[in-house]
Amino acid sequence: MTVSLLVAVFLLTPVAGSFLGVLIRRIPRGETVVSGRSHCESCHVPLSARDLIPILSYAMQKGRCRHCKSRITPDHLWIELAALTVPAMALLARMIASHFQDIPFQLADWDALSFVGDCILGWGLLALSVIDLICLRLPDMLTLPLLLIGLVEGYVTAGTDGALDRALGSTAGWLIFALIAVGYRMIRHRQGLGGGDVKLLAMGGAWVGLGALPVIIGAGSAFGIVLALATAMRSGRFNMTILVPFGPCLAAAIWLARLMLCRS
């Protein structure tokens, strides 16, 4: 991974965060994400280029529309800032891996594609997590392309063996959660795992391979239990019917497994 690539990724990250903000705002509303100009949600005036500079536009306009002075929701800003943590965490994981392997940390060219893959996966998981928190849905238009990209990245970075491991991981992930979902529905007579969760684990397997699936399932389940307990404590209702989004828990586990696989 060259220094120039690293700088380019960090410079483009706010742009990626801005695009994620568009996805997160539009997908739950059923709006198209490939057409239609961005506009103020209060006065509906189309936004110009200077209104769309990631982070800076919000800061310079003090969080208000330049035309009608209405308050701009800070959601976009938080997503753009959160997107910055993705390459930072991917880089930190490589530095930690180098430390434990007693290998001097170097920005090697052969690591470039893997680092870019980390960022693509992290940004995609961020968008999926926020959307699931908003509307309890994991849209196929994000999950399935990420699954395909993961398979391709496995072939490019690790050859045929890597592609086979990723394909097996994706297939096994889908089968495991699909069987759990069917079994839960037969026993409890209600849905426990949604189809989006099944596809999300399949997507995770496409990025980390077969061997990392136990880490994803174990960590995701642990995160889910913590989230369910926190939700129950906040609502004051301790029962087995409380509804919590599992997507963010599973996404965090996939990201953790991916970072654990980092090599210097």
Image (cartoon, rainbow, N blue to C red):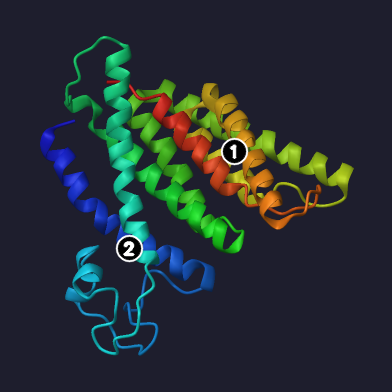
Furthest residue toward left:
4
Q: Looking at numbered disc 2 in the image, what kind of residue is underneath it?
A: Leu
Is label 1 in a helix, a strand or a loop?
helix
Q: Nearer the viewer, residue 241 or 45?
A: 241
Question: Could you tell whether 52 is left or right of 2 in the image?
Answer: right
Count neighbours of disc 2 (C-alpha within 10 A) and say few if under 14, some if 14 to 19, many if 20 or more.
many
Count neighbours of disc 1 (C-alpha within 10 A) and say few if under 14, some if 14 to 19, many if 20 or more.
some
Q: Nearer the viewer, residue 259 or 234?
A: 234
Quadrant assignment, res 262? top left
The x, y position of residue 204, in whole percent, is 51, 37
Q: In the rendered image, which residue does mark 1 sit on?
A: 223
Asked if residue 201 shows in the view, the reply is yes
The x, y position of residue 47, in whole percent, is 26, 80
Q: Looking at numbered disc 1 in the image, what kind of residue is underneath it?
A: Phe
Furthest residue toward top:
102
Instruction: Tell me the residue at 31%/79% (across/down).
Output: 37
Instruction: Tell me the residue at 28%/84% (across/down).
Output: 46
Q: In the rendered image, which residue does mark 2 sit on?
A: 77
Quadrant assignment, res 54? bottom left
Instruction: Tell me the residue at 33%/51% (across/down).
Output: 83
| Precedes in sequence: disc 2 or disc 1 | 2
For the residues bearing labels 2 and 1, Cβ distance under 8 angstroms: no
Instruction: Tell me the residue at 39%/82% (across/down).
Output: 41
